[in-house]
Structures are given as structure tokens and as C-alpha cells.
């Protein structure tokens, strides 16, 4: 019996070593492939930011990350040991890598679907860097300061769109609360670890406090500078038209005929007879029962001074819950040829999306077609 057990243990050890060597040999290939597959699946599976399933998945990732961090630090601090842990020690960082990869993949997907790239691209780039960099951070996840810092950033990013869903409100107050809740949770996490492995936490205390403080300040700066978009709000539809009429539950718009390549252009052209009004339509998604004031911020390009000049701000209220977004429109009669844009903003001026267009003067109104939203 003892001989059989020894043979079984040796066989298991040999197979484990083979698997470990195989992974190390092809690690540089597995990482990028897994990342692309994960992002694709998230893009398909994650439909709405306020749905129960999506939020449970993200909370699951946070829980897995916390468990992985705890196990690694207990092992490195000498509080837990054993043959099984000795064998899987090198694989433990993968647990953290998996959770962070899932979180940042989901964040990238939500920001692709929700953010206005023209104003929020720096924050979007940070998320992309973290997502790609996560594939190369495996060895660094053994370091306490590093993995706790990344965990705090993931936690803060989650709270920024989760609390508006819970409280059905957005704005500076909710953002501040998101930061406070994140700081409280990470502090409690560190406190619990300190009780179990005091020497390891004490040694890293200055690094932990410094890195978390820096991340907190940077995220707050991004918010104040309007770099972080007002997620969970999202511009689902937006466009410039010759006319808009509400008919029951639908909006009928009069749009110019466009060639195929013109539909792909980020800046549209609209041909107007002098004195005719220009209409801008927008459909803004918001979580169920979230109420917010939306404003259309009309601006034209002053080419002599190379700056955008505000013409008007037209507000209306929205109520969240509709998949296609809460629809509304504004129009201006006193317009002139040139470059124009209408920023769809929150009441605090946070840009949800942007409609850019050129107004060209014509003597006869072009042929239009009716579209329904």
C-alpha cells in the first residue's frame, strides 16, 4: 500500500512538473490569446451595466482577487504551509491575474459602450494599459504593495459605476462616496492582514499608504478634469437632422441621404437653407429609475481664435431604464455655415457624448428621408 502511494505521489509530481514546464514555455502565447478571448466574451455577455448578472460577475472577480491576495500573503508570511501549497505556490499569482484581467476587461467593455472617447480617451488608455499589462504582471503579483495597489484601483473603478446604480443618482457627491467606500474597504482588508501577518504588513506600510494615496489623487484629478466619463450614463444614439417630430412612442427624423462612406465619417455634413432650424437628437441610456438632467451644449468653431464658442445650453430631464436610451432633442434657428458640435452633458457639465457636424449653406433644401427612433 505504501509503495503504491509513493508511486502515485511520484507520478503526480512528474505530471505537475511537465505541466509547469509546458506553461512556462508557451506562457507568452497563452496570455494574449486568453486576453482576446476574454474581452470578446465580455463584449458579447455584458449587455447593461445595471443588470444583476453583470454586477455579480464583477463582485465575483473582486472576491477571487481578495482570496488570491490573502492566500499568497499568508503563505509568504509563513502562516500556512503544506505539500499542496508548495506545489501550487507558483500558480497562485495566476488567481490574482485572472481576477484583475476579468475586471479590467469588463471595465474596458463598459467604457467602449458608454464613454465619449473624445474627452475620456486618457482614462480609457489607462484601462487598456492595465488590461494588456496584466498579462505581464504575473511575477509582480507576489509583491504586496503592487497587487494591493492594483486591487484598490479595480475597487475604485467598480464603485464609480456601482454606487450610482444603487443610489440611482450621479454627480460629485456619489463620486466622493465611491472614493470613501473604496478607501474603507481597502483599509479593512489591510487591517485584517495586519492582524494575521503583522511583520509583512508593517514592512510594506509606507509603500501601501503612498501608492494608494497616489492612485486616489490621480483618479480624483481625472474626475475633476472631466477625463473620467459620467458612467453609467451612455449616449446610445445621436445625430443632426432637418426636422424631428414625436409620434406616440417614436421619434420621426428627417435625415439627408448619405453614401456608404459618409455614414462612417465621424463629422457629418448637413446642407441648410438660410433661416432653417437645425435639430440634434440624442438617446441617453441610464440605469433603471435613475433621474438626471441632460443638456445639449451648442458650440461653433471660431476659426480665427481656434476655439469653440458656446451658443446655448438646452436642458431636459431623463428617466433611466430603457435599453435604447431616453430620447430627446433640441434645435437652433440662428445658425450659420461652419463647424459645429453639440455636447450631450450632465447637469455638472460631464460629457456623455458628442455630435459633430458641418453646416453648408445651400439655396434649396436637399432631398431627405424619414427615419424612426
Image (cartoon, grey):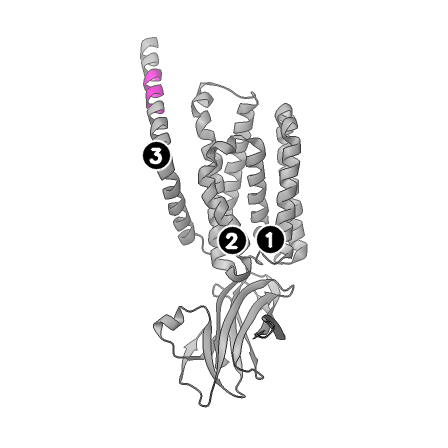
Secondary element type, mark 1: helix
- Sequence-wise, the earlier of marks 1 and 3 is 3
Q: Which residue bears the numbered disc 1?
A: 166
Along the viewing direction, whichever of 372 and 289 lies nearer the viewer: 372
- Sequence-wise, the earlier of marks 3 and 2 is 3
Q: Are marks 1 and 3 in contact (CB under 8 Å)?
A: no
Q: Which residue bears the numbered disc 3?
A: 26
Quadrant location of residue 224? bottom right
Q: How far separated are the C-alphas under marks 1 and 2?
A: 24 Å
Q: In x, y percent, where is residue 300?
A: 57, 75
Q: Which mark lies nearer to you, 1 or 2?
A: 2
Where is 160 relative to 90, above or below?
A: below
Q: How far separated are the C-alphas under marks 1 and 3?
A: 43 Å
Q: In x, y percent, where is residue 70?
A: 55, 30
- Sequence-wise, the earlier of marks 1 and 2 is 2
Asked if residue 249 can be seen in this view, the reply is: no
Which numbered disc covers residue 85? none
* Quadrant the N terminus occupies: top left
Q: Which residue bears the numbered disc 2?
A: 124
Amino acid at each position: 500500500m505504501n509503495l503504491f502511494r509513493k508511486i502515485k505521489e511520484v507520478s503526480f509530481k512528474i505530471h505537475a512538473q511537465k505541466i509547469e514546464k509546458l506553461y512556462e514555455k508557451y506562457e507568452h502565447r497563452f496570455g494574449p490569446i486568453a486576453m482576446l478571448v476574454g474581452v470578446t466574451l465580455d463584449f458579447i455577455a455584458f449587455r447593461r451595466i445595471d443588470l444583476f448578472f453583470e454586477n455579480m460577475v464583477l463582485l465575483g472577480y473582486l472576491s477571487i482577487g481578495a482570496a488570491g491576495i490573502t492566500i499568497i500573503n499568508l503563505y509568504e508570511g509563513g502562516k500556512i504551509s503544506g505539500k499542496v501549497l508548495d506545489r501550487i505556490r507558483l500558480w497562485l499569482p495566476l488567481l490574482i491575474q485572472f481576477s484583475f484581467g476579468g475586471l479590467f476587461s469588463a471595465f474596458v467593455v463598459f467604457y467602449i459602450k458608454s464613454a465619449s472617447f473624445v474627452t475620456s480617451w486618457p482614462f480609457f488608455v489607462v484601462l487598456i494599459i492595465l488590461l494588456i499589462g496584466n498579462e505581464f504582471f504575473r511575477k509582480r503579483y507576489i509583491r504586496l504593495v503592487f497587487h494591493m495597489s492594483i486591487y484598490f484601483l479595480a475597487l475604485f473603478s467598480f464603485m464609480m459605476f456601482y454606487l450610482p446604480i444603487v443610489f440611482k443618482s450621479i454627480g460629485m457627491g456619489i463620486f466622493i462616496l465611491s472614493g470613501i467606500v473604496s478607501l474603507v474597504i481597502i483599509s479593512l482588508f489591510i487591517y485584517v492582514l495586519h492582524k494575521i501577518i503583522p511583520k509583512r504588513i508593517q514592512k510594506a506600510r509606507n509603500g501601501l499608504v503612498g501608492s494608494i494615496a497616489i492612485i486616489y489623487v490621480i483618479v480624483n484629478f481625472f474626475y475633476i478634469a472631466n477625463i473620467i466619463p459620467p458612467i453609467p450614463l451612455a449616449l446610445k444614439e445621436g445625430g443632426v437632422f432637418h426636422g424631428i417630430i414625436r409620434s406616440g412612442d417614436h421619434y420621426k427624423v428627417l435625415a439627408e441621404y448619405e453614401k456608404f462612406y459618409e455614414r462612417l465619417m465621424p463629422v457629418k455634413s448637413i446642407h441648410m437653407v438660410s433661416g432653417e432650424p437645425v435639430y440634434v437628437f440624442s438617446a441617453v441610456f441610464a440605469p433603471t429609475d435613475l433621474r438626471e438632467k441632460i443638456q445639449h451644449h451648442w458650440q461653433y468653431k471660431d476659426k480665427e481664435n481656434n476655439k469653440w464658442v458656446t451658443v446655448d445650453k438646452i436642458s431636459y430631464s431623463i428617466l433611466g431604464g430603457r435599453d435604447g436610451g431616453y430620447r430627446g432633442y433640441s434645435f437652433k434657428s440662428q445658425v450659420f455655415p461652419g463647424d459645429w458640435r453639440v455636447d450631450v452633458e450632465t447637469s455638472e457639465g460631464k460629457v456623455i457624448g458628442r455630435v459633430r457636424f458641418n453646416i453648408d449653406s445651400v439655396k434649396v433644401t436637399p432631398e431627405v428621408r424619414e427615419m424612426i427612433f
